[in-house]
Image (cartoon, coloured by chain):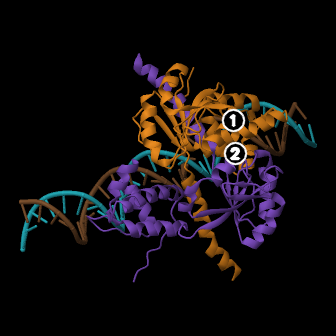
Chain colours: A purple, B orange, C cyan, D brown
Amino acid sequence: MIEKILTTPSLPTVRRLPTYLRLLKELQDEKQHYVSSTYIAERFQLEPIQVRKDLAAMGIVGQPRLGFAVTELTCAIMQFLGWNNASEAFLIGAGNLGSALAGYSGFADYGLNIVAAFDVDKSKIGTRIHDIKVFPLQKLPDLALRLHVHIGILTLPAAAAQTTTDMLVQAGITAIWNFTPVKLMAPKGVIVEKVDLAASLAVLSRSVKEKLPLKIAQGA
Amino acid sequence: MIEKILTTPSLPTVRRLPTYLRLLKELQDEKQHYVSSTYIAERFQLEPIQVRKDLAAMGIVGQPRLGFAVTELTCAIMQFLGWNNASEAFLIGAGNLGSALAGYSGFADYGLNIVAAFDVDKSKIGTRIHDIKVFPLQKLPDLALRLHVHIGILTLPAAAAQTTTDMLVQAGITAIWNFTPVKLMAPKGVIVEKVDLAASLAVLSRSVKEKLPLKIAQGA
DNA sequence: AAGTTATCGATAATTATTTATCGATAACTT
DNA sequence: AAGTTATCGATAAATAATTATCGATAACTT
């Protein structure tokens, strides 16, 4: 028996998976048993071949003429991302954005469970944001150890981002979801994934700027 | 005189520009007059050549041995992104996330100014979120016309995303910053830029999952 | 039952993006 | 003043990602 060696899927591929997952859940609700790469591609304005390559990269195989089994595919992606059993995470920074994330119910689908929030602001400590208790930041190392939490969601002012990161690393946090605009420095072994609002806005702004002269030219 | 034809910078390049901008502002505060691609690269763990290519793509030229003039570079990037004069935007959806964005003061640096919020929730209409007034959603077309606003920030539940988008397009909104997990369908000419939290979390989750077996192997 | 067709997966080609090489420039050092 | 060095920009090479081609498969149609 020949075991196909799977190269780990590329970053762009991983980024597309949640989109597929959303559609698959929808199809499951509609009791659809199979879905083709053609259909998925159409829904997201991608190329069918790209969808097939993405799925193939995870070792998923389809059936000619039928496509992919919806339930099987869903499970495979969930498992691949580790979203089938929830990971517990700390929220660091209970301000506007932190509060918004705490209140977002959708994370359940993403295998993420925020178990506690932390802040240095005394007016916030002791309160609850969307049912999540806010602790003083200095309690984090102790709680991380006791609750075996190793994921941190960073939603605090840019100025505090790096020093707090250093503290998180000390406390055994090994994965940081960074919502600050700061490029965080962390030792190898600590994963940092940045949600880069500025980058996203730059793309939007640039597209707008690029389009304007074209429109004028068209109108003339 | 030979005019160099500038190919419009690639998407990855555009996405890196705000990061550079942040550093440049910092250097300006420190009264640094020049900065080299080597230094920028070091700060963000990039290759110097990549930084130079990014800047070259905008038509910015440096000086051998000195690098790039900080102020000039800042202006060039700001101008390139259209961030030197603020664009007015509507916030559609005054929930947790919308409220957080309304309260984010950093957008001033990004050439973005939220002038009004909209919602269908009667308990929100008429109130203010961080000084921004919340209007009923159906008032949007009228206000868009009168205030000449053509950027919409979409922060509402997934279920309402597409129908609201259709309405925004009707109202003359031509650029949508999409914070919902939905792949929005919009006519050509309407720019949609998605802030894909799920994609970002997928990358984090996958990295975590990928690392675990390695760690165990290392420990053994 | 035979022919048609939608889809898959393997391989190849193309395109996009990053990284390397190297001569030119101009500040700094001796 | 001559030599050294950090950096730039142009060109080339390498890598990554997307897209195309095409034979194989199996459901559907006639």
Crowding near the residue tagged with mark 2, few <14, some 14–19, many ≥20 C-alpha atoms within 10 Å? many
Q: Quadrant of the N terminus of chain A?
A: bottom left
Question: As drawn, which residue projects farthest toward the top?
Answer: A220
Q: Position of residue B92 (x, y in %)?
A: 54, 37
Q: Residue drawn at (56%, 59%), measured in percent from left and top?
A: B202
Q: Residue drawn at (59%, 68%), measured in percent from left and top?
A: A86
The residue singled out by tag 2 in the image is A96
Question: Cα distance, mark 2 to mark 1?
Answer: 10 Å
Judged left or right of residue A45, residue B79 is right
Q: Amino acid at mark 1?
A: His
Above-or-below relation of B12 to A65: above
Q: Secondary structure at mark 1?
A: loop
- Dot 2 and dot 1 residues touching (CB under 8 Å): yes
Q: Amino acid at mark 2?
A: Asn
| Both marks 2 and 1 on one chain | no
Q: Residue drawn at (53%, 34%), measured in percent from left and top?
A: B152
Which chain letter matches label 1? B
Judged left or right of residue B167, residue A199 is right
Q: Report the front residue among B57 and A201.
A: A201
Residue B95 at least partly seen? yes
Q: Residue drawn at (42%, 63%), measured in percent from left and top?
A: A55
